[in-house]
Image (spheres, rainbow, N blue to C red):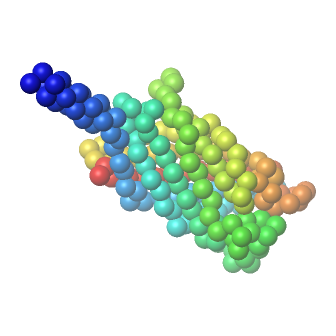
Amino acid sequence: MRKALLFSLITAFVAVAQLSQAQTAWKASNASVTFKIKNAGINVKGSFGGFKGKILFDPGNLAGSKFIGIVQAGTVNTKNRGRDRHLRKSDFFDVAKHPTIKMKSTKITKSGGKYYADFQLTIKGVTKTYKIPFNFSQKGNQGTFNAYFEINRKDFGVGGNSLILSKTAKITLNVTATKG
């Protein structure tokens, strides 16, 4: 009898522990990935489409939270077809060999009222780690995630050694998601 009671208590404890570690899954309903970079002193704006991601986020359990986001590199759009075709070639995104750009969080923290995610960003088969600040707001079952960060395009072999193209690309991520 005692063994059965002890077994039941242990089973209940494990079940409660697993429930407390469960994460809130979010389904992206709208996402934008945009960038801005100077080319010959002029700001060029663009975007990527085909966003797919996995969002497990609970402000009360950041250690168990994670983000994975993937965009299709071939969807690059600067509203200039000729430039977009060139950006898909090997000296830029090389979409034939590297069709996706991927971000995966490894750690999420909060400091001073702001969230931070350590992300592994992979472009053209090169992975670099960035600590990216982001905002999260929630109204009911709707959540919004926003982030802004800068990368050095040369770290990923994007754009070669162009002297007129800035090294710094400014990236903005906006994701609206629904709990569930």
Vertical relation: 19 (above or below) 37: above
Against 152, is 162 above or below?
Answer: below
Q: With 78 as the anchor, is 179 left or right in this view? A: left
Q: Does residue 137 appear anywhere in the picture?
A: no
Q: Residue at x 72, y 60 (%)?
A: 124
At x 67% / y 42%, what residue is drawn?
129
User: Residue 27: where, in percent of width, then height?
Assistant: 37, 55
Q: Position of residue 100 (x, y in %)?
A: 62, 64
Which of the 4 quarters of the picture holds residue 38?
A: bottom right
Q: Position of residue 146 (x, y in %)?
A: 50, 45
Vertical order, 114 against 100 (above or below): above
Nearer to me, 142 or 41: 142
Horizontal side of 10 relative to 121 (left or right) equals: left
Q: Residue at x 28, y 47 (%)?
A: 141
Instruction: Give the residue furthest to the left.
Output: 1
Q: Toward the viewer: 8 or 157?
A: 8
Q: Residue at x 76, y 54 (%)?
A: 156
- Closer to the camera in the image, 141 or 54: 54
**Image quarter of residue 61:** top left
How many numbered marks appear? 0
Return the x and y of residue 142 as percentages of the image width and height.
32, 49
In the rendered image, which quarter contains the N terminus? top left
Q: Is residue 91 visible?
A: yes
Query: In screen coordinates, is 140 left or right of 33?
Result: left
